[in-house]
Amino acid sequence: MRPTRYPPELRRKALDLLADGEPVKKVAVALGLSDQTVYQWRRRHLPHLGRGGPEPSRVMDLRAARRRIAALESELTALRRATELLRDVVSPKGDSRQCT
């Protein structure tokens, strides 16, 4: 038995309804599809709805933010170290006397 091919518009409509929070059974009945087909589409195209985890775009945003935070912390560490080194060499009051 060959799987039935559904038009992309039907799949898109089902996925839109699922993304809006409609239950799988209700979407399947409304569009004349089997529950199993709708579950497969949801698992394949909307994985964040099945697991209860964050959306993929939010995961990528979090990764980018963590990379940026790590870079900034590294930069801050370097600046603090440079400040410590300069403190030993330069007078904090900026001594303006000429060296003789």
Image: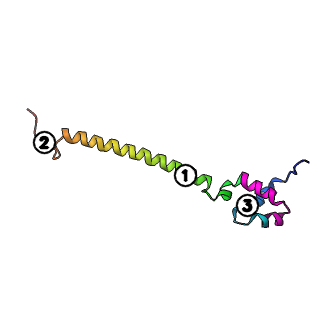
Which residues fall within the magenta stretch? 26-44
Label 2 residue SS: loop
Residue designated by label 2: 96
Q: Residue 13 location, x and y as percent?
A: 77, 60
Mark 1 / mark 2, whichever is N-terminal: 1
Mark 2 / mark 3, whichever is N-terminal: 3
Q: In the rendered structure, which amino acid carries the disc numbered 3?
A: Asp
Mark 1 / mark 3, whichever is N-terminal: 3
**Residues at marks 2 and 3 touching, judged by CB atoms closer than 8 Å:** no
Label 3 residue SS: helix
Residue designated by label 3: 16
Identify the main secondary structure in magenta: helix
The residue that appears at 80% across and 57% down in the rendered structure is 36
Quarter assignment of residue 28: bottom right
Q: Is residue 56 above or below residue 28?
A: above
Residue 37 covered by magenta stretch: yes
**Residues at marks 1 and 3 touching, judged by CB atoms closer than 8 Å:** no
Residue designated by label 1: 61
Q: Residue 85 location, x and y as percent?
A: 24, 39
Q: In the rendered structure, which amino acid carries the disc numbered 2?
A: Ser
- Rounded to the nearest angstrom, the CA distance separating label 1 from label 3 is 23 Å
- Rounded to the nearest angstrom, the CA distance separating label 1 from label 2 is 50 Å
Q: Residue 54 location, x and y as percent?
A: 60, 56
Residue 95 covered by magenta stretch: no
